[in-house]
Image (cartoon, helix red, strand yellow):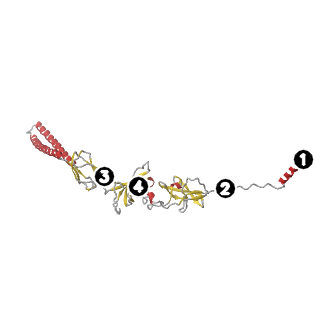
Amino acid sequence: MKTFAKSVVVAVAMVAAGCGGGSKAAPPPPAAQVVQKPMGVRAVTPAPQLESSVLQATGGVRAKQEATLSAQGSGALTRISVKVGERVKRGQVLAQLDTSNARIAADQARAAKAAADAARDGATAEVERARALAEAGSLARASLDKAEVGYRQAQAQAAQAAAAFANTQEILRDATITAPFDGVITSRSRNEGDYVSPGTAIFGLVNTQDLEVRVPVPEAFVDRVKVGSVVQGTINPSGAPFEARVTSLGATIDPQTRTVEVLADVLPAQDTRGVQLRAGALVELDFSAAASSEGKPGQAGLFLPAQAVQSQGQHGFVWVVQDGKAQRRDVKVERVLPGFVRVVQGLNPEERVVADASLPLQNGTALQVVQ
Protein backbone atom coordinates (compact mmCIF):
# COMPACT_ATOMS: atom_id res chain seq x y z
CA MET A 1 0.00 0.00 0.00
CA LYS A 2 2.82 2.37 0.85
CA THR A 3 4.56 1.41 -2.35
CA PHE A 4 1.44 2.40 -4.42
CA ALA A 5 1.11 5.78 -2.65
CA LYS A 6 4.73 6.59 -3.23
CA SER A 7 4.40 5.73 -6.91
CA VAL A 8 1.47 8.10 -7.24
CA VAL A 9 3.40 10.91 -5.56
CA VAL A 10 6.37 10.34 -7.84
CA ALA A 11 4.12 10.36 -10.92
CA VAL A 12 2.43 13.60 -9.91
CA ALA A 13 5.79 15.16 -9.27
CA MET A 14 7.06 14.11 -12.66
CA VAL A 15 3.99 15.49 -14.39
CA ALA A 16 4.36 18.77 -12.54
CA ALA A 17 8.01 18.91 -13.43
CA GLY A 18 7.22 18.16 -17.05
CA CYS A 19 4.60 20.86 -17.21
CA GLY A 20 6.79 23.47 -15.57
CA GLY A 21 9.97 22.48 -17.17
CA GLY A 22 11.17 25.99 -16.45
CA SER A 23 9.43 27.25 -19.67
CA LYS A 24 6.52 29.77 -19.96
CA ALA A 25 3.06 29.00 -21.46
CA ALA A 26 2.53 30.05 -25.10
CA PRO A 27 0.67 33.40 -25.42
CA PRO A 28 -2.81 33.43 -27.07
CA PRO A 29 -2.93 34.31 -30.77
CA PRO A 30 -3.28 38.01 -31.49
CA ALA A 31 -6.87 39.30 -32.15
CA ALA A 32 -7.78 39.77 -35.86
CA GLN A 33 -7.75 43.39 -37.02
CA VAL A 34 -11.30 44.81 -37.84
CA VAL A 35 -11.46 46.12 -41.43
CA GLN A 36 -14.03 48.97 -41.98
CA LYS A 37 -16.23 48.44 -45.05
CA PRO A 38 -16.59 51.63 -47.14
CA MET A 39 -20.04 53.16 -47.17
CA GLY A 40 -21.57 53.51 -50.62
CA VAL A 41 -22.67 57.07 -51.37
CA ARG A 42 -23.66 59.17 -54.34
CA ALA A 43 -21.57 62.26 -54.97
CA VAL A 44 -22.28 65.42 -56.93
CA THR A 45 -20.09 68.17 -58.26
CA PRO A 46 -21.25 71.77 -57.67
CA ALA A 47 -22.70 73.32 -60.80
CA PRO A 48 -21.58 76.83 -61.79
CA GLN A 49 -25.13 77.60 -62.93
CA LEU A 50 -28.56 76.05 -62.71
CA GLU A 51 -30.05 74.19 -65.62
CA SER A 52 -32.71 76.22 -67.37
CA SER A 53 -35.28 73.49 -66.78
CA VAL A 54 -35.43 74.21 -63.06
CA LEU A 55 -36.12 77.87 -63.78
CA GLN A 56 -39.13 77.17 -65.98
CA ALA A 57 -42.70 77.63 -64.87
CA THR A 58 -45.83 76.30 -66.55
CA GLY A 59 -48.76 78.64 -67.03
CA GLY A 60 -51.77 79.32 -69.18
CA VAL A 61 -52.59 81.83 -71.87
CA ARG A 62 -55.70 83.94 -71.50
CA ALA A 63 -57.22 86.83 -73.38
CA LYS A 64 -57.02 90.21 -71.71
CA GLN A 65 -60.37 91.07 -73.31
CA GLU A 66 -63.06 88.42 -73.18
CA ALA A 67 -66.80 88.98 -72.88
CA THR A 68 -70.15 87.24 -72.95
CA LEU A 69 -72.49 89.46 -74.94
CA SER A 70 -76.06 89.46 -73.65
CA ALA A 71 -79.30 91.05 -74.74
CA GLN A 72 -80.08 94.39 -73.16
CA GLY A 73 -83.69 94.44 -74.26
CA SER A 74 -86.59 92.06 -74.81
CA GLY A 75 -87.88 90.70 -78.08
CA ALA A 76 -87.38 88.12 -80.81
CA LEU A 77 -84.07 87.88 -82.64
CA THR A 78 -84.80 89.04 -86.18
CA ARG A 79 -81.25 88.95 -87.54
CA ILE A 80 -77.89 87.41 -86.62
CA SER A 81 -75.08 88.85 -88.70
CA VAL A 82 -72.02 86.80 -87.66
CA LYS A 83 -70.88 83.21 -87.34
CA VAL A 84 -68.71 81.44 -84.79
CA GLY A 85 -65.05 81.96 -85.66
CA GLU A 86 -65.68 85.21 -87.51
CA ARG A 87 -63.45 88.17 -86.71
CA VAL A 88 -65.35 91.37 -85.93
CA LYS A 89 -64.53 95.02 -85.34
CA ARG A 90 -65.53 97.25 -82.47
CA GLY A 91 -69.02 98.68 -83.06
CA GLN A 92 -69.96 96.10 -85.68
CA VAL A 93 -73.60 94.96 -85.53
CA LEU A 94 -73.81 91.32 -84.45
CA ALA A 95 -77.56 90.80 -83.98
CA GLN A 96 -80.84 92.67 -84.07
CA LEU A 97 -84.00 92.29 -81.96
CA ASP A 98 -87.53 93.02 -83.13
CA THR A 99 -88.14 96.75 -82.68
CA SER A 100 -91.77 97.07 -83.86
CA ASN A 101 -93.23 97.92 -80.48
CA ALA A 102 -90.20 99.97 -79.50
CA ARG A 103 -90.55 102.14 -82.59
CA ILE A 104 -94.26 102.75 -81.92
CA ALA A 105 -93.42 103.77 -78.36
CA ALA A 106 -90.67 106.04 -79.67
CA ASP A 107 -93.04 107.75 -82.09
CA GLN A 108 -95.56 108.34 -79.29
CA ALA A 109 -92.84 109.73 -77.05
CA ARG A 110 -91.63 111.99 -79.83
CA ALA A 111 -95.14 113.40 -80.29
CA ALA A 112 -95.59 113.89 -76.55
CA LYS A 113 -92.27 115.71 -76.39
CA ALA A 114 -93.29 118.00 -79.24
CA ALA A 115 -96.56 118.86 -77.48
CA ALA A 116 -94.77 119.52 -74.21
CA ASP A 117 -92.21 121.71 -75.95
CA ALA A 118 -95.03 123.73 -77.53
CA ALA A 119 -96.79 124.13 -74.19
CA ARG A 120 -93.52 125.24 -72.61
CA ASP A 121 -92.98 127.80 -75.38
CA GLY A 122 -96.52 129.16 -74.86
CA ALA A 123 -96.05 129.36 -71.09
CA THR A 124 -92.75 131.15 -71.62
CA ALA A 125 -94.40 133.81 -73.79
CA GLU A 126 -97.26 134.15 -71.32
CA VAL A 127 -95.04 134.68 -68.30
CA GLU A 128 -92.90 137.22 -70.13
CA ARG A 129 -96.00 139.31 -70.96
CA ALA A 130 -97.23 139.01 -67.39
CA ARG A 131 -93.90 140.22 -66.03
CA ALA A 132 -93.93 143.21 -68.37
CA LEU A 133 -97.48 144.18 -67.35
CA ALA A 134 -96.70 143.70 -63.68
CA GLU A 135 -93.69 146.03 -63.94
CA ALA A 136 -95.94 148.66 -65.58
CA GLY A 137 -98.51 148.22 -62.79
CA SER A 138 -101.17 146.99 -65.18
CA LEU A 139 -101.38 143.41 -63.81
CA ALA A 140 -102.33 142.18 -60.39
CA ARG A 141 -99.78 140.24 -58.39
CA ALA A 142 -102.02 137.16 -58.29
CA SER A 143 -102.17 137.01 -62.08
CA LEU A 144 -98.36 137.19 -62.29
CA ASP A 145 -98.01 134.38 -59.77
CA LYS A 146 -100.42 132.25 -61.78
CA ALA A 147 -98.40 132.84 -64.96
CA GLU A 148 -95.15 131.91 -63.14
CA VAL A 149 -96.65 128.64 -61.87
CA GLY A 150 -97.93 127.79 -65.34
CA TYR A 151 -94.47 128.43 -66.77
CA ARG A 152 -92.74 126.15 -64.25
CA GLN A 153 -95.30 123.41 -64.84
CA ALA A 154 -94.77 123.63 -68.60
CA GLN A 155 -90.99 123.38 -68.08
CA ALA A 156 -91.37 120.26 -65.92
CA GLN A 157 -93.72 118.60 -68.40
CA ALA A 158 -91.31 119.33 -71.25
CA ALA A 159 -88.42 117.81 -69.29
CA GLN A 160 -90.51 114.74 -68.46
CA ALA A 161 -91.47 114.28 -72.10
CA ALA A 162 -87.83 114.63 -73.15
CA ALA A 163 -86.79 111.93 -70.65
CA ALA A 164 -89.52 109.59 -71.91
CA PHE A 165 -88.38 110.11 -75.48
CA ALA A 166 -84.74 109.48 -74.54
CA ASN A 167 -85.80 106.25 -72.84
CA THR A 168 -87.47 105.00 -76.01
CA GLN A 169 -84.31 105.80 -77.98
CA GLU A 170 -82.26 103.80 -75.48
CA ILE A 171 -84.65 100.86 -75.89
CA LEU A 172 -84.13 101.03 -79.64
CA ARG A 173 -80.35 101.05 -79.18
CA ASP A 174 -80.56 98.07 -76.81
CA ALA A 175 -82.28 96.12 -79.56
CA THR A 176 -79.02 96.18 -81.52
CA ILE A 177 -76.13 94.05 -80.21
CA THR A 178 -72.71 95.36 -81.23
CA ALA A 179 -69.11 94.27 -80.60
CA PRO A 180 -67.53 96.21 -77.70
CA PHE A 181 -63.99 95.52 -78.99
CA ASP A 182 -62.15 93.84 -81.85
CA GLY A 183 -62.12 90.08 -81.55
CA VAL A 184 -63.33 86.68 -82.67
CA ILE A 185 -66.80 85.23 -82.06
CA THR A 186 -66.19 82.08 -80.00
CA SER A 187 -69.78 80.98 -79.32
CA ARG A 188 -73.42 81.62 -80.23
CA SER A 189 -76.19 80.35 -77.99
CA ARG A 190 -79.30 81.72 -79.75
CA ASN A 191 -80.76 81.63 -83.24
CA GLU A 192 -82.97 83.89 -85.29
CA GLY A 193 -86.53 83.75 -84.02
CA ASP A 194 -85.58 83.01 -80.40
CA TYR A 195 -87.15 85.31 -77.84
CA VAL A 196 -84.62 86.87 -75.49
CA SER A 197 -84.83 89.10 -72.47
CA PRO A 198 -82.27 91.31 -70.71
CA GLY A 199 -79.35 89.17 -69.54
CA THR A 200 -79.78 86.35 -72.05
CA ALA A 201 -76.33 85.32 -73.30
CA ILE A 202 -76.03 85.30 -77.08
CA PHE A 203 -72.35 85.53 -78.11
CA GLY A 204 -68.90 84.87 -76.73
CA LEU A 205 -66.23 87.33 -77.89
CA VAL A 206 -62.46 87.09 -77.38
CA ASN A 207 -59.71 89.46 -78.43
CA THR A 208 -57.13 87.00 -79.74
CA GLN A 209 -54.60 89.73 -80.52
CA ASP A 210 -54.17 90.85 -76.91
CA LEU A 211 -53.07 87.83 -74.88
CA GLU A 212 -51.31 87.43 -71.56
CA VAL A 213 -49.73 84.54 -69.70
CA ARG A 214 -50.63 83.77 -66.11
CA VAL A 215 -47.95 81.65 -64.46
CA PRO A 216 -47.27 80.70 -60.82
CA VAL A 217 -43.59 81.37 -60.02
CA PRO A 218 -41.85 79.86 -56.94
CA GLU A 219 -41.41 82.44 -54.20
CA ALA A 220 -37.71 81.55 -53.95
CA PHE A 221 -36.79 83.50 -57.08
CA VAL A 222 -39.84 85.62 -57.88
CA ASP A 223 -38.12 88.69 -56.40
CA ARG A 224 -35.52 88.42 -59.15
CA VAL A 225 -38.21 88.70 -61.80
CA LYS A 226 -38.67 92.35 -62.70
CA VAL A 227 -41.65 94.09 -64.25
CA GLY A 228 -40.75 94.97 -67.81
CA SER A 229 -38.30 92.11 -68.34
CA VAL A 230 -38.76 89.96 -71.44
CA VAL A 231 -38.87 86.19 -70.94
CA GLN A 232 -38.73 83.37 -73.47
CA GLY A 233 -41.60 80.93 -73.73
CA THR A 234 -42.59 77.80 -75.60
CA ILE A 235 -46.02 76.52 -76.54
CA ASN A 236 -46.92 73.10 -75.19
CA PRO A 237 -46.79 70.62 -76.87
CA SER A 238 -45.63 72.08 -80.19
CA GLY A 239 -42.54 73.75 -78.71
CA ALA A 240 -43.04 76.86 -80.85
CA PRO A 241 -41.26 79.84 -79.29
CA PHE A 242 -42.68 83.20 -78.28
CA GLU A 243 -41.77 86.12 -76.06
CA ALA A 244 -43.66 87.79 -73.23
CA ARG A 245 -43.08 90.94 -71.22
CA VAL A 246 -43.68 90.79 -67.45
CA THR A 247 -46.38 93.27 -66.46
CA SER A 248 -47.35 92.30 -62.92
CA LEU A 249 -46.01 90.45 -59.88
CA GLY A 250 -48.55 89.19 -57.40
CA ALA A 251 -48.71 90.86 -54.01
CA THR A 252 -49.45 87.64 -52.11
CA ILE A 253 -48.01 84.13 -51.88
CA ASP A 254 -50.25 81.11 -52.32
CA PRO A 255 -50.03 79.28 -48.96
CA GLN A 256 -50.54 75.89 -50.60
CA THR A 257 -48.09 76.04 -53.50
CA ARG A 258 -45.74 78.77 -52.19
CA THR A 259 -45.92 80.51 -55.54
CA VAL A 260 -46.63 84.05 -56.70
CA GLU A 261 -48.82 84.87 -59.69
CA VAL A 262 -46.91 86.58 -62.49
CA LEU A 263 -48.63 88.13 -65.52
CA ALA A 264 -46.84 88.74 -68.81
CA ASP A 265 -48.12 90.22 -72.07
CA VAL A 266 -47.50 88.10 -75.15
CA LEU A 267 -45.37 90.09 -77.61
CA PRO A 268 -46.05 90.09 -81.37
CA ALA A 269 -44.86 86.78 -82.79
CA GLN A 270 -41.59 86.72 -84.70
CA ASP A 271 -41.45 83.01 -85.48
CA THR A 272 -44.19 80.63 -84.33
CA ARG A 273 -43.38 78.00 -86.98
CA GLY A 274 -46.94 78.24 -88.21
CA VAL A 275 -48.42 77.52 -84.78
CA GLN A 276 -50.87 80.12 -83.48
CA LEU A 277 -50.88 81.00 -79.81
CA ARG A 278 -54.45 80.75 -78.52
CA ALA A 279 -56.19 81.60 -75.30
CA GLY A 280 -56.30 78.55 -73.05
CA ALA A 281 -53.00 77.10 -74.30
CA LEU A 282 -50.42 75.70 -71.88
CA VAL A 283 -47.02 77.32 -72.13
CA GLU A 284 -43.68 77.28 -70.33
CA LEU A 285 -41.81 80.45 -69.47
CA ASP A 286 -38.05 80.35 -68.96
CA PHE A 287 -36.99 82.66 -66.12
CA SER A 288 -33.30 81.68 -66.20
CA ALA A 289 -32.34 85.09 -67.54
CA ALA A 290 -34.50 86.89 -64.97
CA ALA A 291 -33.07 84.80 -62.12
CA SER A 292 -29.46 85.18 -63.27
CA SER A 293 -26.99 87.62 -61.88
CA GLU A 294 -28.15 90.43 -64.21
CA GLY A 295 -24.67 91.88 -63.93
CA LYS A 296 -24.84 92.33 -60.15
CA PRO A 297 -21.71 91.49 -58.17
CA GLY A 298 -21.86 88.61 -55.75
CA GLN A 299 -24.48 86.67 -57.65
CA ALA A 300 -22.09 84.02 -58.99
CA GLY A 301 -21.89 80.82 -57.01
CA LEU A 302 -21.90 77.05 -56.90
CA PHE A 303 -25.25 75.29 -56.92
CA LEU A 304 -26.07 72.06 -55.09
CA PRO A 305 -29.23 70.07 -54.47
CA ALA A 306 -30.67 71.14 -51.13
CA GLN A 307 -30.44 67.53 -49.89
CA ALA A 308 -26.63 67.71 -50.10
CA VAL A 309 -26.47 70.47 -47.49
CA GLN A 310 -27.33 70.42 -43.80
CA SER A 311 -28.17 74.05 -43.18
CA GLN A 312 -29.96 76.32 -40.80
CA GLY A 313 -30.41 79.75 -42.25
CA GLN A 314 -27.34 80.75 -44.23
CA HIS A 315 -24.93 78.49 -42.39
CA GLY A 316 -24.49 74.75 -42.81
CA PHE A 317 -22.10 72.00 -43.80
CA VAL A 318 -21.53 69.39 -46.50
CA TRP A 319 -19.63 66.10 -46.63
CA VAL A 320 -16.77 66.29 -49.11
CA VAL A 321 -15.26 63.09 -50.55
CA GLN A 322 -11.49 63.40 -50.07
CA ASP A 323 -9.10 60.49 -50.60
CA GLY A 324 -11.96 58.04 -50.25
CA LYS A 325 -13.04 59.42 -46.88
CA ALA A 326 -15.67 61.83 -45.61
CA GLN A 327 -14.61 65.28 -44.56
CA ARG A 328 -17.01 67.78 -43.04
CA ARG A 329 -16.88 71.22 -44.63
CA ASP A 330 -18.66 74.27 -43.21
CA VAL A 331 -20.31 76.38 -45.91
CA LYS A 332 -22.40 79.49 -46.31
CA VAL A 333 -25.44 78.99 -48.52
CA GLU A 334 -28.40 80.84 -50.02
CA ARG A 335 -31.64 79.13 -51.00
CA VAL A 336 -32.47 80.11 -54.55
CA LEU A 337 -35.11 77.59 -55.64
CA PRO A 338 -37.14 74.79 -54.12
CA GLY A 339 -34.65 71.92 -54.06
CA PHE A 340 -31.51 73.98 -54.79
CA VAL A 341 -29.09 76.13 -52.80
CA ARG A 342 -26.25 78.39 -53.85
CA VAL A 343 -22.98 77.91 -51.98
CA VAL A 344 -21.35 81.30 -51.62
CA GLN A 345 -18.48 80.35 -49.33
CA GLY A 346 -16.52 77.30 -48.19
CA LEU A 347 -16.48 75.05 -51.27
CA ASN A 348 -14.33 74.70 -54.37
CA PRO A 349 -15.91 73.99 -57.76
CA GLU A 350 -13.90 70.82 -58.38
CA GLU A 351 -14.77 69.11 -55.09
CA ARG A 352 -17.20 66.21 -54.92
CA VAL A 353 -19.95 66.40 -52.33
CA VAL A 354 -22.02 63.58 -50.84
CA ALA A 355 -25.48 63.94 -52.36
CA ASP A 356 -27.29 63.16 -49.07
CA ALA A 357 -26.04 65.16 -46.10
CA SER A 358 -28.35 63.31 -43.70
CA LEU A 359 -26.30 60.07 -43.86
CA PRO A 360 -24.67 59.02 -40.55
CA LEU A 361 -21.14 60.11 -41.48
CA GLN A 362 -18.16 61.25 -39.46
CA ASN A 363 -14.83 62.74 -40.38
CA GLY A 364 -12.75 59.88 -41.76
CA THR A 365 -15.63 57.57 -42.64
CA ALA A 366 -14.52 55.40 -45.57
CA LEU A 367 -16.61 56.08 -48.65
CA GLN A 368 -17.19 54.39 -51.96
CA VAL A 369 -18.79 56.61 -54.57
CA VAL A 370 -21.49 54.83 -56.53
CA GLN A 371 -23.73 56.06 -59.31
Three-letter code for the amino acid on which mark 4 is drawn: Thr
Mark 1–mark 2 Cα distance, whole angstroms, equals: 55 Å
**Residue 279 figure quarter:** bottom left
Which residue is nearer to you in this view: 167 or 197? 197
Q: Which residue is mark 4?
A: 58
- Is 356 placed above or below 119 here? below
Chain-order first, disc 2 or disc 3: 2
Label 3: element kind: strand
Mark 2 belongs to which amino acid? Val
In the image, 206 versus 118, the foreground residue is 206
Q: Residue 116's quadrant in the figure?
A: top left
The residue at which mark 3 appears reads as 66
Q: Is residue 146 left or right of residue 234?
A: left
Q: Earlier in the sequence, mark 1 or mark 2?
A: 1
Name the one closer to the observer, 301 or 187.
Answer: 187
What residue type is disc 1 on? Answer: Phe
Q: Which mark is residue 34?
A: 2
Q: Could you tell me residue 44's position as x and y percent?
A: 53, 59
Q: Which residue is mark 1?
A: 4
Label 4 neighbour load within 10 Å: few <14, some 14-19, many 20+: some
- Residue farthest right in this picture: 2
Tell me the distance, in whole angstroms, between the alpha carbons under discs 3 and 4: 22 Å
Q: Secondary structure at mark 1?
A: helix
Q: Secondary structure at mark 4?
A: strand
The answer to which of marks 4 and 2 sits earlier in the sequence is: 2
